[in-house]
C-alpha cells in the first residue's frame, strides 16, 4: 500500500510511504518472515496476524526481490516501485505520486470503496503558489 501523509518537515507538507503487509490467520505464518528477513513488525490485527514492513529501504529491497516471482500482485509491485523511485521536486511530482497511490489502492481488494482519494487530498492542501 502507498500512504500520503501530512508531514510538516517536507517541502510541500506531505510525504509518500510505501508499506508491505502480509496477513495470515496464525501468528507463526508471519512470524517466520520477521525472523528470516530481520525487518518488519508482527502484530495482531482483528482476527489475524500481520507482518508489516514500513522502512522504505527494506520495502524497496523486498519488492525488488519478489517482483520476478509475482503474478497476482505484479501490477501492485510495479506501481509501488514507481512510487518509491519517483523524486518529488515539484507539486506536479507530488500530485503524480498521489495518483499512483490511488491507482495502487484501487488494485487492492480491501481498499476499494473505503480509501480516500489522496490526489484530491493533496490538491486541497497544497497551494499552486508553493
Image (cartoon, helix red, strand yellow):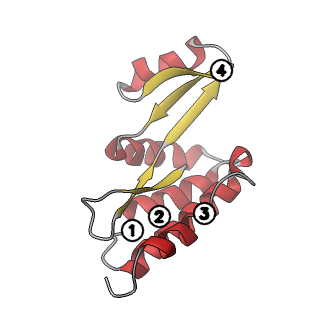
The tag on residue 48 is 4
Label 4 or label 1, whichever lies nearer to me, is: 4
The tag on residue 35 is none
Give percent across and percent down for residue 100. 55, 66
Give percent across and percent down for residue 118. 55, 64
Q: Label 2, label 1: how many angstroms apart (C-alpha)?
A: 6 Å
Q: Residues within 10 Å of mark 1 (few under 14, many from 20)?
A: some
Q: SS class of the residue under badge 1?
A: loop
Taking depth in this image into account, of 91 and 107 the one nearest to the observer is: 91
Q: Is residue 79 left or right of residue 12?
A: right
| Residue pointed to by mark 1 | 86
Q: Quadrant of the C terminus?
A: bottom left
Q: Label 3, label 1: how many angstroms apart (C-alpha)?
A: 15 Å
| Residue pointed to by mark 3 | 102
Taking depth in this image into account, of 47 and 21 the one nearest to the observer is: 47
Nearest to N terminus: mark 2 or mark 3:
2
Please name the residue shown 51% across and 53% down the image.
2
Please name the residue shown 65% across and 54% down the image.
115
Give percent across and percent down for residue 50. 56, 26
Q: Label 4, label 2: how many angstroms apart (C-alpha)?
A: 30 Å
Label 2 or label 3, whichever lies nearer to me, is: 3
Please name the residue shown 63% across and 55% down the image.
105
Q: SS class of the residue under badge 4?
A: strand
| Residue pointed to by mark 2 | 82
Amino acid at each position: 500500500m502507498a500512504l500520503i501523509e501530512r508531514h510538516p518537515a517536507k517541502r510541500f507538507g506531505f510525504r509518500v510511504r510505501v508499506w508491505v503487509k502480509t496477513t495470515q490467520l496464525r501468528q507463526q505464518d508471519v512470524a517466520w518472515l520477521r525472523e528470516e528477513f530481520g525487518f518488519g513488525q508482527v502484530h495482531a490485527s482483528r482476527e489475524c496476524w500481520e507482518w508489516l514492513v514500513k522502512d522504505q529501504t527494506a520495502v524497496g529491497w523486498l519488492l525488488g526481490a519478489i517482483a520476478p516471482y509475482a503474478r497476482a500482485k505484479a501490477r501492485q509491485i510495479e506501481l509501488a516501485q514507481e512510487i518509491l523511485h519517483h523524486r518529488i521536486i515539484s507539486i506536479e511530482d507530488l500530485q503524480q505520486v498521489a495518483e499512483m497511490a490511488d491507482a495502487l489502492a484501487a488494485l487492492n481488494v480491501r481498499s476499494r470503496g473505503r480509501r480516500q482519494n489522496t490526489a484530491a487530498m493533496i490538491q486541497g492542501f497544497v497551494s499552486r503558489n508553493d
